Amino acid sequence: MKMIMFNTKKYDQQSFAQALEGSKHTIRYVEAKLSIETVKLAAGYECICIFVNDIADAEVIRELAENGTKFIALRCAGFNNVDLHAARKHGVCVARVPEYSPFGVAEHALALMMSLNRKIHRAYNRVREANFALSGLLGFDLHGKVAGVVGTGKIGRIAATILNKGFGCKVLAYDKYPDAALAEDGVEYVELEKLLESCDIITLHCPLNPETHYLINASSIRLMKPGVMLINTSRGALIDTLAVIEGLKSGRIGSLGIDVYEEEGDLFFEDLSGEVIQDDVFARLLTLPNVLVTGHQAYFTLEALHNIAQTTVQNITEYEDNHTCANAVFCDRIRASNSSRLTQ
């Protein structure tokens, strides 16, 4: 199948080159993100491959269909950037990579926790300047603390297990569909309000949909314990950034670790070190000493890149052979997921 991949980096090309060995597919790599301005690049390609910050809204999908695209291969798990109703209307099949590195994402969430708690990011900069003073670097034992995990799919389940078995935390979890095995292993399922009120640390591991948009907002922040640590490695719009900034200023939120940001599309995956950040909200976050930001790298492991490429190529092959594939996502399924479990 002839396909075009948008929003590609060198590491994408390397992983897909390996996955495509021996296949009959041909691929054109472009650095541009998919948008209404770049959609014409896909003319004549039956298949396009996109990532988390590409835009496949109704207008883009209409033009894709008019120009011959039949299949959208997402090289990610989330699909909130695709208008699935428009895709179905125009007969465009959409498939995703349902999982690729649940351990990597969960481990990154824990790395953010540890770094924030023990002020590793600040200590690193101090030591490079020969400043070995400990003032301002005080942390706390994770052992015995109450940690909350919102969403106990593959990633959340791993994070909960590490917190429970590895660090000795009491773990509370919220999910509409509790995991019986996780509950038997010592994780206590509670309502969201109870979790927010009780936890010293809260980590988010749920997808973005209408139900979870701004799950963390001014109202939910008021329920939290003063000084709570908040971690988000899932989707940026799970948290209302302005409300979180107010929570940080008031001390209700003691520290924030994020690998995602609700307006990250114009920021992440690019080198902007020589430019002035135009997003004033994001720039404000970067000034706060108790905030740690990474640029959507939680998934970024060798294993993940390999799995993404292999599964994406498999999806494309299945579609070419059968006009569908096991990882296809349809409108009726997205409606079901919006009212079901909070998992990722």
Image (cartoon, rainbow, N blue to C red):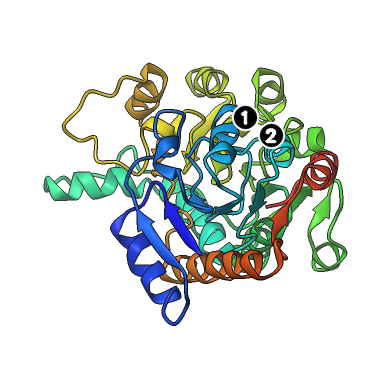
9 displayed left or right of 147: left
Q: Which mark is residue 17?
A: none
Q: Position of residue 312 (x, y in %)?
A: 55, 64
Contact, CB < 8 Å: mark 2 with mark 1?
yes
- In front: 208, or 17? 17
Q: Secondary structure at mark 2?
A: helix
Q: Which residue is mark 1?
A: 58
Q: Position of residue 301 (x, y in %)?
A: 43, 65
Q: Which residue is mark 2?
A: 86
- Residue 132 seen: no
Instruction: Determine whether 226 is above or below 246 in the image.
Output: below
Q: Amino acid at mark 1?
A: Ala
Bin the neighbour count of mark 2 within 10 Å (Cα to Cα): few under 14, some 14-19, many 20 and up: some
Give me the residue at 43% from left, 53% from top: 4
Say which quarter of the image contains residue 167.
Answer: bottom right
- In front: 273, or 175? 273
Q: Secondary structure at mark 1?
A: helix
- Residue 153 seen: yes
Give me the residue at 81% from left, 36% from top: 194
Q: Amino acid at mark 2?
A: Ala
Give me the residue at 32% from left, 25% from top: 287
Say which quarter of the image contains residue 73.
Answer: bottom right
- In front: 222, or 99? 99
